[in-house]
């Protein structure tokens, strides 16, 4: 299975792995960045209170109508609806299918310049990869953020509002600082997942770590040794990421301990 | 007599298309300096009424005139005579509220809990706010806990902090929503002492409580509510020694005084 010669042969292609590492880091970092921004917008949409047909739900005495089509229409929030559909579709379909649809169906219609980032990463494959990963993780991160905000006790909001603080001030000073603390562990999880999931971009020819494995295998006819190296690199990326976030989590939880 | 601070007219709060009537037409005048205690069985609408006063609950109908302004209106006429959207946050600043479960902000120290709203809302200087907070903390005997986090305090201490946090905004009225109901029995006294002191200083207070002793001793008006209605109102002597209504008599026979 393993042999010293095998590692020696693989080591000749270590530059491929270095390029792959750079690509994976870049892919994950951009995915986290854009995925998080997308998730923030989705979460705001899901938590918004935009109800264009609100007036239909009130009868002539000012009472809320109970049940029926009009009451349902009055509760309808189009922003929430769009965001919910987005989240459910992206969570309910395989990542590979999403990636292929974006690369083979959507992006052929969008001309991208053909050049290589750092001389090794093909831009016209890398960008669809980032878009697919970000759109997918945006759906997951949205639900994490929404649940985190909704988990804060309603009394906190009431206390802040009773002191005369506005909705925005309450969100910024009271709700978000507490919510962020609650959502850090699942977000760390999602970041680690993104680093691992980015390996799927190998299927559309993005030259990340798994691409280096395949290339080395083709040249050396060795598979075990390149995989071992890839495993080590992935572990060295994900393990510190979760440790760093765990550190911030501890720092932020000072109000929880006696 | 004294000047009216909050005038409530026919306040109603209905749920389920009027099937549930939490408040079914309450009218009451709260004067400056009043210590109004609201008693009644659970589910009678006491808390809903109190929470409606600063619009934590949006009433279904009725009017609340606070300091001359109808705060239930969506739009009001300003000094220049123009119709403007009512800024409820402005009015809430003048109504301090104390909750059953304290609702201190757990991620901030006691001092930060107290100075946040004055700094953010009133744009008070941080040093000025902190000095003011320390004076208030000293008054309730908690100056040494300024740097502590809420979880480090006992229930009674938390509630005393919650009271002075509301006082930081210099409210014209303090609303107390069962302030001692979540406390261990031995801590009820320390919170009632602070409230009694506040009443003696002339603060207008509306207190929903099950502490009949406090109602008797500190209140100048007692309201008895049942089924969303104001059943009987009077001085503590009227209510406790000469109850008229059968519901009130039954209620008083069940509670320990």
Image: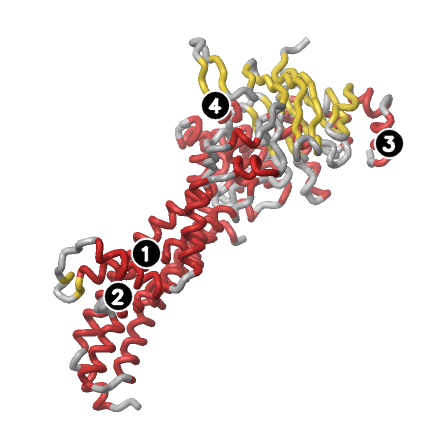
* Chain name for mark 2: A
User: What is the x, y in percent for residue A250?
Assistant: 44, 57
- Along the line of sight, the residue nearer the viewer: B173 or B47: B47
Give the quadrant of residue A185: bottom left
Q: Which residue is mark 3?
A: B250
Residue located 54% across and 16% down the image: B69
- Residue A13 visible in the snapshot: yes
* Mark number displayed over residue B87: 4
Dot 1: within a 10 Å radius of its alpha carbon, few (fewer than 14), some, or many (20 or more) residues? many
Q: Which residue is mark 1?
A: A134
Q: Earlier in the sequence, mark 1 or mark 2?
A: 2
Q: Which residue is mark 2?
A: A24
Callout 2 secondary element: helix
Callout 3 secondary element: helix
Residue located 68% across and 42% down the image: B183
Residues at marks 1 and 4, CA–CA distance in whole angstroms: 40 Å
Dot 2: within a 10 Å radius of its alpha carbon, few (fewer than 14), some, or many (20 or more) residues? many
* Chain name for mark 3: B
Report the mark closest to the observer, 3 or 4.
4
Report the mark closest to the observer, 1 or 4.
1
- Position of residue A131 relative to residue B43, above or below, is below
């Amino acid at each position: 299975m393993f042999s010293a010669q095998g590692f020696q042969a693989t080591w000749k292609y270590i530059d491929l792995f270095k390029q792959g590492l750079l690509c994976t880091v870049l892919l994950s970092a951009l995915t986290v960045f854009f995925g998080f921004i997308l998730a923030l917008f989705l979460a705001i949409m899901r938590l918004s209170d935009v109800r264009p047909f609100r007036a239909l739900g009130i009868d002539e005495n000012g009472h809320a109508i109970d049940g029926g089509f009009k009451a349902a229409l009055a509760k309808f929030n189009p922003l929430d609806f769009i965001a919910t559909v987005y989240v459910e579709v992206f969570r309910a379909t395989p990542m590979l299918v999403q990636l292929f649809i974006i690369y083979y169906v959507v992006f052929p219609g969008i001309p991208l310049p053909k050049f290589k980032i750092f001389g090794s990463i093909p831009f016209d494959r890398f960008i669809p990869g980032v878009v697919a990963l970000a759109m997918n993780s945006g759906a997951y991160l949205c639900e994490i953020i929404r649940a985190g905000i909704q988990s804060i006790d309603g009394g906190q909001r009431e206390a802040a509002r009773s002191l005369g603080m506005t909705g925005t001030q309450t969100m910024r000073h009271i709700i978000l600082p507490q919510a962020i603390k609650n959502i850090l562990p699942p977000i760390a999880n999602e970041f680690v997942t993104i680093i691992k999931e980015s390996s799927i971009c190998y299927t559309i020819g993005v030259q990340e770590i798994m691409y280096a494995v395949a290339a080395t295998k083709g040249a050396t006819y060795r598979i075990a040794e390149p995989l071992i190296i890839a495993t080590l690199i992935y572990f060295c990326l994900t393990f510190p990421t979760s440790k760093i976030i765990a550190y911030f989590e501890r720092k932020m939880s000072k109000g929880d301990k006696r | 007599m004294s000047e009216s601070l909050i005038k409530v007219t026919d306040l109603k709060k209905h749920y389920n298309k009027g099937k549930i009537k939490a408040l079914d037409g309450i009218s009451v005048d709260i004067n400056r300096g009043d210590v109004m205690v609201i008693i009644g069985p659970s589910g009678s609408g006491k808390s809903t009424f109190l929470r409606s006063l600063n619009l934590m609950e949006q009433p279904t109908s009725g009017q609340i005139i606070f300091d001359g302004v109808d705060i239930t209106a969506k739009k009001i006429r300003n000094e220049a005579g123009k119709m403007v959207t009512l800024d409820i946050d402005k009015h809430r600043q003048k109504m301090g509220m104390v909750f059953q479960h304290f609702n201190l902000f757990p991620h901030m120290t006691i001092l930060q809990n107290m100075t946040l709203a004055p700094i953010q809302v009133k744009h008070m200087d941080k040093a000025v706010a902190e000095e003011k907070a320390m004076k208030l903390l000293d008054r309730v005997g908690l100056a040494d806990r300024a740097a502590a986090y809420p979880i480090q305090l006992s229930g009674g201490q938390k509630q005393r902090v919650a009271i002075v946090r509301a006082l930081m905004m210099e409210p014209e009225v303090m609303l107390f929503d069962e302030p001692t109901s979540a406390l261990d029995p031995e801590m009820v006294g320390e919170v009632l002492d602070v409230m009694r002191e506040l009443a003696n200083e002339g603060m207008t207070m509306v207190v929903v409580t099950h502490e009949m002793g406090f109602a008797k001793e500190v209140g100048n008006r007692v309201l008895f509510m049942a089924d969303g209605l104001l059943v009987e109102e009077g001085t503590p002597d009227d209510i406790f020694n000469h109850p008229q209504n059968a519901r009130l008599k039954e209620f008083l026979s069940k509670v320990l005084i």
